[in-house]
Amino acid sequence: MPDAFKVLIYATWRDRLLVFDEPDFPEIALQVPGGTVEHMETIERAALREFVEETGLAPKAPFRLIETCDYRFEQKGSLITHRRSYFHVALPEKPAETWVHWETMPFGGGEPIRFRFFWLELDEAHQRLGYGMADALAHLVGRPAKPVLHRENLFR
């Protein structure tokens, strides 16, 4: 059983991907918007909520589920598993080239975190994203995808 259910959102405009860094924490790798699915929340609803909370944008375009898989990592000597659902939203209009937005409800609690959003070409994003966040980009850039744990098989 996963330790947490997460959503990650690949927001694109043409061949560019929306990413962010944390200017106050330069050691943190580049990321895409996303977060934790709340109790009794669907993954679709979580994707939209997290995207709005983290970016300040409220796109009218549909969010399309592209892959669900488990991401495992070690934290403080324990193996942690996050079940990640990756979504794609193709923005019809490009927002600003860059902007700052504050995450007011960080996963671990604490003070708000400053996020600086900007755009990268898909191939560059594939190379620079951290924490396994590029794992499903193959669906957008035409690379062979790794095996997928399909959504309908998750809760058997």
Image (spheres, rainbow, N blue to C red):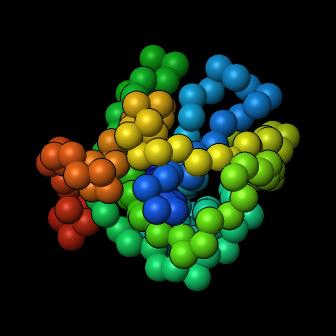
Residue drawn at x 20%, y 62% as measured from the top left: 150
Quick one: 10 or 98, which is closer to the camera? 98
Considering every residue shown, the one lying at the far top of the view is: 77
Quick one: 109 or 49, which is closer to the camera? 49
Residue 9, given in percent of the width and then of the height, sits at 49, 58
Residue 71, given in percent of the width and then of the height, sits at 35, 40
Residue 6, given in percent of the width and then of the height, sits at 47, 54
Residue drawn at x 30%, y 51% as measured from the top left: 141
Position of 59 relative to 108 (above/below):
below
**Which quarter shows the C terminus?**
bottom left
Quick one: 51 or 35, which is closer to the camera? 51
Q: Is residue 56 left or right of residue 135?
A: right
Residue 79, given in percent of the width and then of the height, sits at 38, 27
Position of 96 relative to 120 (above/below):
below
Residue drawn at x 42%, y 64% as measured from the top left: 88
Position of 152 relative to 9 (above/below):
below
Quadrant hosting residue 153 = bottom left
Can residue 80 be seen here? no
| Count of numbered circles on the image | 0
Quick one: 96 or 48, which is closer to the camera? 96
Quadrant hosting residue 113 = top right
Position of 98 relative to 39 (above/below):
above
Considering every residue shown, the one lying at the far bottom of the view is: 60
Can residue 84 be seen here? yes
